[in-house]
């Protein structure tokens, strides 16, 4: 099940008795914090939750499935989340 930002804002507002506006500001700041700090550090660890990390995907050859035309996909950075053991235990 996918959740939109507005769904998450609603959940935060209901769970914390904060206004929707304040909940939205909280979520926006958290995303802003992740983006800015991952640019600098490449690693953010949140105890009992997990570690956000920037990893580099090497360049590779892609292919258009319709035309079979090959093209180069450049090297890119991506964010991964390695969950903590506590989160994994909750899910399993």
Image: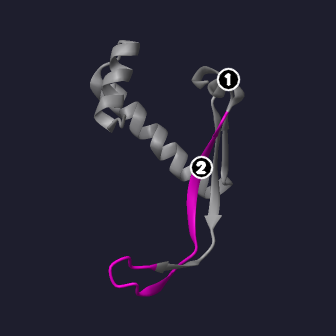
- Mark pair 1, 2: CA separation: 18 Å
Numbered mark located on residue 86 in the image: 1
In the image, what residue occupies the spot 34% across and 32% down? 24
Along the viewing direction, whichever of 66 and 25 lies nearer the viewer: 66
Rendered-image quadrant of the N terminus = top left
Residue 40 rendering spot, x and y as whole percentages: 64, 56
For the residue labelled by badge 2, is the local secondary structure a helix, a strand or a loop? strand
Rendered-image quadrant of the C terminus = top right
Identify whether 76 is placed above or below 18: below
Classify residue 91 by image quadrant.
top right
Numbered mark located on residue 11 in the image: none
Residue 87 appears left or right of 32:
right
In the image, what residue occupies the spot 46% across and 86% down? 70
Classify residue 14 by image quadrant.
top left
Other-residue count near label 1 (Cα within 10 Å), few / some / many at <14 / 14–19 / ≥20: few
Other-residue count near label 2 (Cα within 10 Å), few / some / many at <14 / 14–19 / ≥20: few
Along the viewing direction, whichever of 27 and 83 lies nearer the viewer: 83
Residue 58 rendering spot, x and y as whole percentages: 63, 72
In the image, what residue occupies the spot 28% across and 28% down? 21
Residue under numbered circle 2? 80
- Please give the range of residues in magenta: 63-83
Along the viewing direction, whichever of 16 and 83 lies nearer the viewer: 83
Q: Is residue 76 magenta?
A: yes
Q: Mark 2 or mark 1, which is nearer the start of the sequence?
A: 2
In the image, what residue occupies the spot 34% across and 19% down? 13
For the residue labelled by badge 1, is the local secondary structure a helix, a strand or a loop? helix
Residue 28 rendering spot, x and y as whole percentages: 40, 39
């Amino acid at each position: 099940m996918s959740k939109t930002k507005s769904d998450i804002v609603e959940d935060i507002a209901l769970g914390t008795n904060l206004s929707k506006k304040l909940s939205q500001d909280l979520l926006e700041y958290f995303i802003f914090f992740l983006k800015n700090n991952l640019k600098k550090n490449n690693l953010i660890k949140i105890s009992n939750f997990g570690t956000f990390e920037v990893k580099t995907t090497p360049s590779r050859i892609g292919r258009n499935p319709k035309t079979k035309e090959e093209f180069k996909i450049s090297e890119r950075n991506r964010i991964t989340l390695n969950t903590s053991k506590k989160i994994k235990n909750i899910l399993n």
